[in-house]
Image: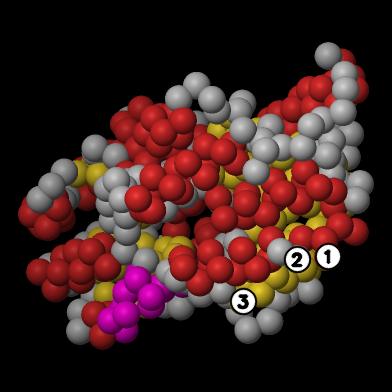
Amino acid sequence: MADVMRPSPMHLVYLVHDLGDPAVLRRLDMLRPRLATAVVIGFHRAATAPAEVAGWPAIGLGQTADARLGQRVLSVLRARMLLRRLRPQLAGATVVIARQLEMLVLARSARDLYARDAVLAYECLDIHRLMVGRSPVSTALRGLEGHLLRGVDLLIVSSPAFIREHLSAAHGLRLPPVCLVENKVLRSDHAALPAPVTKPPGPPWRIGWYGVLRCRRSLLLLAALARQLPGQVVVDLRGRPSRAAIPDFDAIVAAAPGLNFLGAYDRRRDLADIYGAVHFTWAIDFYESDANSRWLLPNRLYEGGLHGAVPIALAAVETGRWLAAQDAGMLIEEPLSDALLRYFSDLRQDAYVIAAARVASVPRGAWLDEGQDGERLAAALRIRRHARRQATSAGPLEPTPR
C-alpha cells in the first residue's frame, strides 16, 4: 500500500465537452501539483479552439453549440470515427478523465484502444434531463451510461445527490468507486484569502446572482422582487447569460429597475469584490427543475459563503440540505414569490447580522479547498491505477465489449 500512496506525477489526457468551460481550468489547476504532463481534448463553443487550457496543450474536435444536444451527439459520433488521430496523445497516458457522458463515449474507446493500462475516470457533474425521463431516448441513454460505466475505474461527482438520486437508482450496485469533489473555491486561485467582511447594512439589500445565468424563472423572480420593493432590494447579475435558455434576457433586465447586469468577471481576481458587494447569494436554479437543479451543489454556493454572502436556497433540494447541515443560509419554500416578498419586506438589520454570523461560523474548509480535495482525488486515481495495473499483470485485458 505504501507504493500505492507514494505520489507519482500523472500523465493526463482530459476529454471535455467545452474547452472554454472555466470549470475545466479549475480541475486542471486542482491537479496541477500532481501532473507531469497533460493534454486537453474537446469541443469548443467559440469559433476557434484555444491552443492551450491552463497552460497545457489543447486539441479541438470541432465547434458545438449550447443547448443543442442533437448536434453534439453527431459531433461525438464523427470524432469517434477519427480516434486514431489521438493515438499520439494517448501514448504514455496514466490517467484519462472524461468530463460528462458524451466525452465518456470517446474516452472509453480511446483508452481501450491506445492506453490500456491507464485509469479511466468519469466526471459526472450534471445530469441532463433526457437521462431521467421515461421516453425511449431516456431509456437508451441510461443503457449507454450503464454500459460505459462498466469500463470506468473511478466515478467523480460534485454532489452526493447525483449518486443517490440518479446513478445508484439507475444502475444499482454496479457503480465503480466514487470520489466526491465539491465545487469549492480553490486556494490556488487566489493570492490572498478574503478577510472577514463587514457589509454595509441594508436596505437596500443586495442580491448577487453570478456565474452561468441560465434559469429564466430565477430571472423573473428576481425582477419581480426588485420591482415590488423599489429601493429596498437591488439585484446584481454577473457572468455569462445563456441566451439559448433565456432568449429575452436583455429585455427582462431592461424592463426591471433594480436589476443590473454588470457583465463578465474573472473568478481568480474578482470574487472578493463582487461577493463583498452583496448581502445575499442567489443559489436557486430551475433550469432542470425535476432533476439536475434539485441535485447539484453550485459554484456560487461556495463562492458566496466564503466571502460572507448569505446563500438563498430552496429548502427541499440538495443545496438547501447542505446549508441546513451547516445551520446557515436563507432557506425558502414554494410559493417563492410570496416567500421572497415576505422575507425582504420584513428584513431588519439585526436579523441580517444573525444570518451573516451563521455563514461566518461555517468552517472555512466547507467553502474552500486548500489542496486537500485535489490530494484526495489524486490518491483515488493512484489507488485505481494500482488496481488496474495489478489486473493487467495477471493477464492481458480482453477488449471491452462494445
Answer above or below: position of 391 versus 231: above
Secondary structure under the numbered disc 2 in the rendered image: loop
Answer above or below: position of 136 versus 233: above
Q: Are marks 2 and 3 in contact (CB under 8 Å)?
A: no
Q: Amino acid at mark 1?
A: Arg
The label shown at residue 85 is 1
Start-end of magenta stretch: 236-250
Mark 2 vs mark 3: in front: 2
**At 61% across and 63% down in the image, what residue appears?**
76
- Lateral position of residue 367 relative to residue 324, left or right: right
The label shown at residue 266 is none
* Residue 86, horizontal then vertical, whole percent: 82, 61
Answer above or below: position of 352 versus 278: above
The label shown at residue 82 is 2
Kindly report the distance in space between the C-alpha atoms of the residues bearing marks 3 and 1: 18 Å
Q: Earlier in the sequence, mark 2 or mark 3?
A: 3
